[in-house]
Amino acid sequence: MSEMLGNRYFIARQYDKAIPQLEAALTEDANVEKVKKKLVICYVQTVQLEKALKLFYEIIIKDPHIIIDTDFYHDDCPCPEILPSWEQKLSFSETPNDLYEVLGILYLYCDYEKSITYLKKAHQVCDHKSLLASILKKLNTSISN
């Protein structure tokens, strides 16, 4: 029940309302990975970046293709709609550190190369160096296999 309501809020782009429903669905659902993918986006869109990065890391360590193989239509992925606004923020920011992380996370849903570019930039300037290094290593290992 929680996942259905969370999905409705997600589709309506009401990310703040989707979060509690999707979090509840993590304990009751067999589609945990699909729920986590949506939660990452919800956390990003509600600027809960620590939570987004932690959950993103969990998914990547398990299997990066959970995100890389996202189907925009069937997964109702909002990344093509939300990425331009995040990139626009980049051009106005004096300290783009968090924006590099956000763009690296979001681009993995649709453009592996751009994701890697932003994650590498984030790794150079952000506080989460070891976490980002682990993510980059896993992504490079998974894609090269």
Image (cartoon, rainbow, N blue to C red):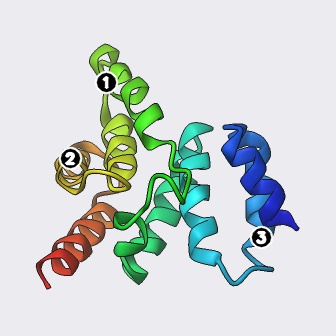
Above-or-below relation of 89 to 8: above
Binning the other alpha carbons within 10 Å of mark 3 as few (below 14), some (14 to 19) or many (20 upward) gives many
Q: Nearer the viewer, residue 4 or 94?
A: 4
Q: Indicate left or right for 142 with 96 as reference.
A: left
Query: Which image quarter holds the N terminus?
Result: bottom right
Q: CA distance from mark 3 to mark 2?
A: 31 Å
Q: Position of residue 91 (x, y in %)?
A: 27, 17
Q: CA distance from mark 1 to mark 3?
A: 33 Å
Q: Indicate left or right for 41 with 84 as reference.
A: right
Looking at the image, which residue is at 57% across and 38% down? 45
Q: Disc 3 marks which residue?
A: 25
Q: Disc 2 marks which residue?
A: 114
Question: Callout 3, which amino acid?
Answer: Ala
Asked whether disc 1 touches disc 2, contact meaning CB atoms under 8 Å apart, the reply is no
Question: Callout 1, which amino acid?
Answer: Leu
Mark 1 or mark 2: name the one nearer the start of the chain: 1
Q: CA distance from mark 1 to mark 2?
A: 14 Å
* Residue 112 sits in quarter: bottom left
Looking at the image, which residue is at 54% across and 49% down? 41
Q: Position of residue 109 (x, y in %)?
A: 38, 55
Q: Position of residue 57 (x, y in %)?
A: 42, 68
Q: Indicate left or right for 28 with 56 as reference.
A: right
Question: Callout 2, which amino acid?
Answer: Lys
Q: Secondary structure at mark 1?
A: helix
Q: Disc 1 marks which residue?
A: 90
